[in-house]
Image (cartoon, rainbow, N blue to C red):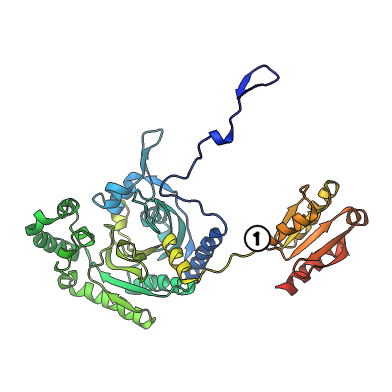
């Protein structure tokens, strides 16, 4: 269908039914009310828990130089080889949507020399991350994580603190049925010995390995232990504990003892290696009994004392974790521990007719100035329909401005639960509404 405007130019009118719907990209989703309330509850809970330990908020860009992740995460990891969203900017520089948080946080903290002002630097973050994975239940290509990093000191007490914080966070959420899986990867020399032992073990099995594991055998043998297709071989693979030196064993034993002191039950699992190259010494994952296979972990972390050097900074120890928001909320909803959404407003201010709209807007501003959440409805719908909308919003009170109220400088306050109302002066209106809300709370 075509129309012509006053200038004579022709332009097209399209029937909305002829326009294809634009859906979110595969592996992403919209977080809409009421789900957004659960989302905010989880983020606020994490912030409250970690700030009680002295961690401060930090945020980093969602895109970074590709080299940051190639050097930090590891060029031979699945994340770098298969899962990153990488593109060139207008200057030809390679950028990547961040697939994880630790490398960016270390870059930010050490790049601004925050560790020269105070050690250790304790920070926490929350935000979106991106991996080109096959979307599954609780796993998306754009996903959210909460995390903490403690940068600048090496101590088993800090490792224990990090693990305990993650555990306390899930306790605060009310999530039960958790298992803490704890392991150590030792220092660089320990890892080198373990790498050699794994190569010696897997090399005679090479012909029976999947294609990915044949490649990992050359580039990243520790990743062999994570493969689900070849899990039968991992069961008999050497254990890193048998190759650790005395210092690494003592460090890990102290971490385990401090967690026991904190009443955090840890299951020692010498097959836990995590998916990133920067980990050393303590590593951990938190599993939930309702999740299975590759999807059983709600998150994890560990120590990464070699990461700073890989990024071009002086040797600086660090430890941290990242926990999945999407999967944690999935479990919280299954357990019924997500609190109901809070009503979106305290009061609805309505005008009966259009001439009273400006007066109603002034009343709404006065109530917001007193710290109340107020929705203004000056539409031309009937009053009864506006008040029904108040029920949907969860507003316990309605403030009505009609012709009489506008003329007399008053407002009618209606208790929507009891259907009782009173008319008060404009000067007394804020106090009356505030008192009524306190009684109804």
Is residue 28 left or right of 414 when viewed as pictured?
left
User: In the figure, residue 178 lies in which quadrant?
Assistant: bottom left
Task: Establish if 428 lies above or below 77.
Answer: below
Is residue 70 left or right of 215 when viewed as pictured?
right
Camera-side residue of 13 and 139: 13
Can residue 107 be seen at all in this image of the molecule? Answer: yes
Where residue 75 sits: x, y (%)? 25, 49
Task: Establish if 93 lies above or below 291.
Answer: above
Identified at 54% across, 61% down, the residue is 40
Q: Residue furthest left?
A: 204
Identified at 35% across, 65% down, the residue is 297
**To which residue does mark 1 refer?**
344
Where residue 369 sits: x, y (%)? 75, 59
Where residue 127 sits: x, y (%)? 46, 55
Position of the C terminus, as image quadrant, is: bottom right
Position of the N terminus, as image quadrant, is: top right
Camera-side residue of 393 and 94: 393
Where residue 216 sits: x, y (%)? 18, 53
Q: Which secondary structure lies at badge 1?
A: loop
């Amino acid at each position: 269908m075509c129309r012509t405007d006053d200038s004579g130019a022709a332009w097209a009118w399209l029937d909305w039914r002829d326009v294809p719907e634009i859906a979110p990209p595969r592996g992403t989703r919209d977080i809409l009310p009421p789900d957004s309330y659960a989302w905010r509850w989880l983020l606020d809970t994490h912030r409250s828990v970690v700030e009680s330990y002295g961690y401060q908020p930090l945020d980093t860009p969602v895109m970074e130089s590709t080299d940051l992740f190639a050097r930090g995460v590891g060029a031979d990891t699945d994340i770098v080889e298969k899962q990153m969203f990488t593109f060139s900017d207008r200057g030809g520089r390679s950028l990547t949507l961040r697939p994880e948080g630790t490398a960016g946080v270390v870059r930010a903290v050490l790049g601004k020399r925050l560790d020269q002002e105070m050690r250790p630097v304790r920070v926490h973050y929350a935000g979106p991350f991106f991996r080109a994975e096959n979307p599954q239940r609780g796993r998306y290509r754009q996903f959210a994580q909460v995390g903490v990093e403690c940068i600048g000191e090496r101590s088993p007490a800090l490792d224990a603190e990090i693990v305990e914080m993650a555990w306390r966070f899930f306790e605060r959420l009310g999530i039960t049925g958790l298992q803490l899986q704890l392991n150590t990867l030792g220092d660089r020399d320990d890892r080198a010995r373990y790498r050699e032992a794994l190569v010696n073990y897997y090399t005679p099995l090479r012909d029976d390995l999947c294609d990915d594991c044949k490649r990992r055998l050359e580039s990243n043998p520790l990743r062999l232990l994570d493969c689900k297709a070849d899990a039968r071989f991992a069961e008999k693979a050497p254990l890193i504990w048998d190759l650790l030196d005395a210092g690494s064993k003592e460090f890990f034993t102290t971490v385990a003892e401090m967690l026991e002191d904190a009443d955090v039950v840890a299951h020692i699992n010498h097959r836990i290696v995590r998916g990133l190259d920067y980990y050393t010494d303590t590593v951990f994952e938190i599993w939930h009994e309702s999740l299975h296979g590759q999807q059983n972990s709600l998150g994890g972390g560990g120590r990464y004392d070699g990461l700073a050097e890989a990024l071009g900074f002086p040797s600086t120890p660090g430890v941290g974790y990242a926990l999945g928001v999407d999967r944690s909320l999935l479990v919280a909803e299954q357990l019924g521990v997500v609190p109901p959404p809070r009503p979106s407003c305290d009061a609805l201010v309505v005008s009966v007719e259009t001439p009273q709209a400006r007066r109603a807007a002034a009343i709404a501003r006065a109530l917001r100035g007193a710290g109340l959440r107020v929705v203004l409805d000056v539409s031309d719908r009937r009053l009864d329909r506006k008040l029904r909308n108040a029920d949907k919003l969860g507003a316990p009170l309605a403030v009505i401005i009609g012709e009489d109220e506008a003329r007399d400088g008053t407002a009618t306050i209606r208790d929507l639960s009891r259907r009782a109302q009173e008319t008060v002066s404009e000067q007394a209106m804020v106090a009356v509404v505030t008192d009524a809300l306190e009684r109804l709370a």
